[in-house]
Amino acid sequence: MTEQPAGQPSTKYKRVLLKISGEALMGDQGYGLHPPTVERIAREVKTVHDMGVEICMVIGGGNIFRGLQGSAQGVERTTADYMGMLATVMNALAMQGALETIGIHTRVISAITMNEVAEPYIRRRAVRHLEKKRVCIFAAGTGNPYFTTDTAATLRANEMSCEAIFKGTKVDGVYDKDPAKHDDAVRYDRITYDDVLAKHLGVMDASAIALARDNDLPIIVFSLDEPGGFKTILAGQGTYTIVS
Ligand code: UDP
């Protein structure tokens, strides 16, 4: 059990990584950042931080730029991917601002060196930040084109020895078909990595799922739209799907 401040529910998790897509930060706008939404997610993170859990975050960039879309519009693919990685840095800075406003010390750690903006990624230094209860937001993906922030999340979660990835989405888990389109969609409580891959369930991209599987890293899919949902699941309750 993790030691937590008095009055907080206990959790079996000492260190986790929260992965959210860039789109989670745009609210209903369709593009960019929606500050009240960023602030709401920051407050969700604080509730878990207050439990004494060490938190890593990876935020996508899809609310601003995605490499595949850019290349479909004529931008050379590698360049487009670097643009996507830079978009994740903007999102990370926005989240850092929101977290620090509510008193959570935060470091943005970039896979692409940009010392004026963010720390470079040095694994041991990042671990030390976590031990000091600073939230570490890993930005710029893996630093390599042809990857996604799902893979970056799995990579960093492994490197930081996180016990699980928490994938915050719009729905409360993994369904056999899109619950927004099908009333009879069924949610899985638990599913294997191989089933996610075989059934093309779109939890994360295939390379991220394989990397999690090969390192026994559970992925917990839950709704970030549910107020208090992140904390509830950390406390061992709530609705979610675990991929293991
Ligand atoms: N990206 C990349 N390498 C990485 C991570 C991200 O090239 O290691 C680029 C890629 O173009 C991607 C974009 O950054 O489309 C934004 O990331 P992602 O699509 O994962 O964001 P999300 O869908 O989670 O918002």
Image (cartoon, rainbow, N blue to C red):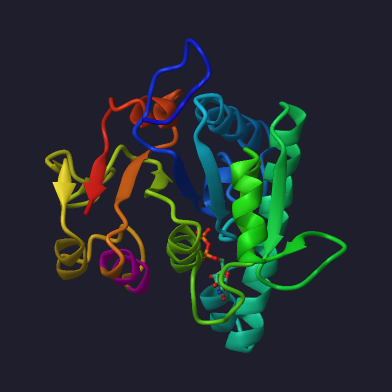
The quadrant where residue 46 appears: top right
Q: Which residues are magenta?
A: 207-213
Task: Answer yes or no: is residue 171 visible.
Answer: yes
Magenta stretch contains residue 50: no
Residue 37 left/right relative to 118: left
| Quadrant in which the N terminus is drawn | top left
- Measuring from the top left, give residue 20's x and y in whole percent: 49, 49
- Measuring from the top left, give residue 93's x and y in whole percent: 73, 50
Residue 2 left/right relative to 77: left
As drawn, 99 above or below 78: above
Extreme residue toward the right, this view: 116
**Of residues 195 and 217, the one drawn nearer to the viewer in this rendering:** 217
Task: Assign the magenta stretch its main secondary structure.
Answer: helix
Extreme residue toward the bottom, this view: 76
**Of residues 57 and 184, the one drawn nearer to the viewer in this rendering:** 57
- Measuring from the top left, give residue 168's x and y in whole percent: 42, 43
As drawn, 5 above or below 161: above
Magenta stretch contains residue 209: yes
